[in-house]
Structures are given as structure tokens and as C-alpha cells.
Image: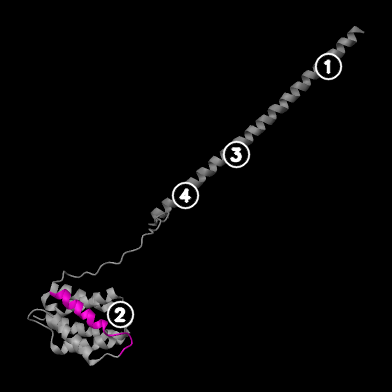
Amino acid sequence: MCVGIVDNDLRKTQGKHKFNKTFFMKLFIVVVLFTAIFATDAMASAQGALIKKKAKDFSDQNSANQGVTPPVKPATPSTQAATPPSPNTPKLSATQQQNINQLVADLKTIKSKSTVTPEQKQRLKQDLQFAAEGTRKPSPESVTKLANDLSTAWPDQKLSPSEQVYLVQNINAVMNSANIPLAESQAALNSAQTILKYSAISKEDAQKIANDLKTITAGLQKK
């Protein structure tokens, strides 16, 4: 009877030990599996980052070998508005400035879409002649033609007040081509042509005025 009880207790004890051993074995396996999974994910992430870096390095190197600059982030454009350059005009004497002011005033009397009177043409011709200083002056014929062509086309112009002043300054420089360097005279002629091009004056009339200025410049620059 005692032997049977002891035998049952022994079996129970062995069963408990067997259960505990099995439980810990399963737990160990689960821990190992989770560790392996996490390690695999971490390794995969590291390998992915390394592959991307190597691919980028290879692409940059390949671009460099082919003479292509790798793309860079474009710079943020400046929000500051561009300032138009001031006209490159020489320093004017008091007399020259007075002549320019008079020519501007003459042109202001010619209103938009109006018919130019003979008196307006004559006044403009006289003030153009007065603008030429020194002993060498444009021929009367060339000044008369410039005055006629400029006054005839002027009612169609749409220049701003400052642009009108710039144009007259250039005309004044052309009228005094005998007294200034050739480069300065040519710069004034080119500037006047550019202003006329965008003045809303017809292309034909703008070309006539430009040709008049060229004729005056050529005549005064002759030695």
C-alpha cells in the first residue's frame, strides 16, 4: 500500500518535471524565433540603406564620368525686383541740359494723333540746330529732314516721359558727334534706335528717323 502511494507521487513528480522541461523548451524556441525575426529586419533595413547609398554613389560617379553634373536643389529665387539700368549718358553742361529741356518741351507740344503744324516743325528744327555746339555742325538739310521726320511720327509715339528724355539725350549726343568720341556717338545712335523700335511709331517712320541720325553722325565724324 505504501509502495503504491510512493510510486504515484514519484510519477506525479516526474510528470511535473517533464511538463516544466517541455514548457521552457517551447519558450526558448519562441524567444529564439522572435530574435531571429528582429535581427533579420534590422539587417534588411541596414542592407537596404547601404544598397541605396551605393546606387546613388554609382549614379553620381557615372554622371561625373560622362561629364554630367549631378542634379542639385535649385536656389530659391530672389524676391527683389530687378532695377532697370540707368542710361549711360555723359555729364552735360548747363547749356546742353537747357537745349535738351527745350527739345523735350517742343515734342510735348505735339499731341497724340494730332496734325503737326509748320510752326511746330520750324521750332523743332531751330532747337535741333541750337543743340549742336562747336564749329562743326550738321548740315541744314540733314537737320531739316530730321525735324520733319521726327515731328511727323511723334503723334503716334507712346513713350513714357523718362523714355522721351532718354531719346532726346541721345539725339543731342548725335547732334554733337563732332565733339565726342566715335564710340560714344555710336552708343547714342544705337540707344536711340532701340527706343524708337519700342515707341509704337511705325517701323517705316522709326527707320527714317534712325537713318537721319546715321547721316548726321557720319557727316560729323568725317575728318
Q: Amino acid at mark 2?
A: Lys
Q: Which residue is mark 1?
A: 12
Magenta-colored segment: predominant secondary structure: helix
Q: Give the side of residue 205 with respect to residue 34, left or right.
A: left
- Please rate how many residues cluster around mark 2, counting C-alpha atoms within 10 Å: few if below 14, some from 14 to 19, many from 20: some
Return the disc, 2 or 3, that comes first in the chain's sequence.
3
- 132 is within the stretch colored magenta: no
Q: Which residue is mark 3?
A: 41
Give x and y (percent) for residue 73.
43, 54
Q: How many marks?
A: 4
Quadrant of residue 138 in the image?
Answer: bottom left
Return the disc, 1 or 2, that comes first in the chain's sequence.
1
* Label pair 2/3, CB-CB below 8 angstroms: no
Give x and y (percent) for residue 21.
74, 22
Residue toward you, 117 or 40:
117
* Range covered by the magenta-colored residues: 95-114
* Label pair 1/2, CB-CB below 8 angstroms: no
